[in-house]
Image: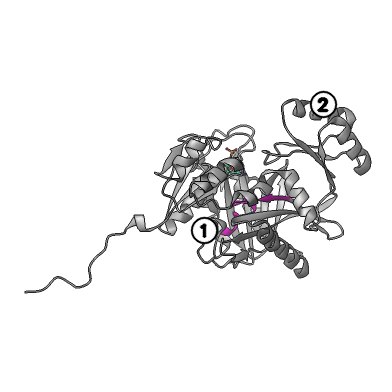
Amino acid sequence: MTILSSVSARSFDSAAMPTVTMIGGGQLARMTHQAAIALGQRLRVLAERPDDPAAQVTPEVVLGHHDDLAALRKAAVGSYALTFDHEHVPTEHLEALIAEGVNVQPPPHALIFAQDKLRMRHKLAELGVPIPAYTEVTSVADAAAFADANGWPFVLKAVRGGYDGRGVWMPADLAEATAIVEDQLAHGVSLMAEAKVELKRELSAMVARSPFGQAAAWPVVETVQRNGQCAVVIAPAQDLAQAKATEAEALALRLASELGVTGAMAVELFETHSGELLVNELAMRPHNSGHWGMDGACTGQFEQHLRAVLDYPLGSTKPLAPVTVMANILGAAEVPEMSMDERLHHLSARIPDAKVHLYGKGERPDRKIGHINILGDDPAETREKAERAAHWMSHAVWTDGWDHHHD
Ligand code: AIR
């Protein structure tokens, strides 16, 4: 008689693998969920609506608002770490959760510098980090005095809440500034002014850091902006002197450590014509400038963010090709008649090496609804291909006039 094999089969114990809670159900949570699947983990999201991008794909959805402490509590129960797909959760709620034993990563004392643009600037100034001239604006007179000293137009920003060009204005004269400042202050929006920098281009230095203190940097990338919003990312940034790239990476690593950041962080930078690097904004979460790494780096930002908030060792950030170009698929001014599925079909036929990421979002003008990654050897060719693919997916029009019916 044979005795049962001594090797006992064990069913996969999903409870032994960590659940991470992400507050916010947008595309960043959706792509973090993809990474969680690969790691055998689960991502629970607090989403506002059942059809939010991440809520569509995870069975662990808590519906609620990030301003509601009870909803945050419900989403946090039993998870190993609580993290974010946007930076808008009130820090007092996070302090309350921490007091109840929730592991919040990044912690509120770090996150505050990504939430509050004025506190971030005060902190960076204190750390001696180069930033554009700025001031708090509590009256039209503050704005006028700043513009007189630093020139028109200047940049007016909401201290909290804006992203992708929302909450940012560029008044050209006193009449324009007066109208915006009066209106915003009347609506309870805190404001700051910043000098408009003559820039050569925008860069982003992304890093991830774990609570243990391990940190890793991806190569510095160029972010091409259109209408106040990231359109294209070139990884690594071309024609950037090695010393400058190293300076940017070192700055991002230093900031992550000095501010106590955990998880992914993007440091958005201005490169001036004289080659100076100035910090523009900080994001403490996966960021559009890191999407290239999903296909173009050994470890992408979504996996790295999970590893970091769970205090695992971090993955290699090594690029997998000489250049990777990411192009955002933005909602067109008018939704094309051709369905998204048919657009995808044609794209697949024409550009088989395009790596497509669609977010499951409704098409609204300029809304980020997906992105394309292309890996290549030649930066210009790779960029053209990525932009052509993304434009096709947005508009159902080939920028080079190609017509699939006649080829
Ligand atoms: N996001 C958060 N901060 C900046 C960006 N881009 C992502 C998050 C958020 C989503 O954008 O994933 O949930 C919101 O996108 P939308 O298009 O609905 O405003």
Residue in view at x 67 percent, y 41 percent:
163
Q: Nearer the viewer, residue 386 or 249?
A: 249
Q: Mark 2 and mark 1 in contact? Answer it, CB < 8 Å.
A: no
x and y, in percent, of residue 244 in the image: 77, 65
Q: Residue at the left extreme?
A: 1
Whether residue 346 is visible, yes or no, is no
Q: Which residue is mark 1?
A: 303
To which quarter of the image does residue 213 belong? bottom right
Ligand 1 closer than 8 Å to label 2 CB: no
- What are the residue bounds of the magenta stretch? 281-293
Q: Amino acid at mark 1?
A: Glu
Residue in view at x 44 percent, y 50 percent:
79
Image quadrant, ligand 1: top right
x and y, in percent, of residue 274 in the image: 87, 59
Q: Residue at the front extreme?
A: 99
Q: Which residue is mark 2?
A: 179
Q: Element under label 2? A: helix
Check disc 2: other Cα within 10 Å, few if <14, some if 14-19, many if 20+: few
Q: Does the magenta run of residues contain 147?
A: no
Quadrant of the frame with the N terminus: bottom left
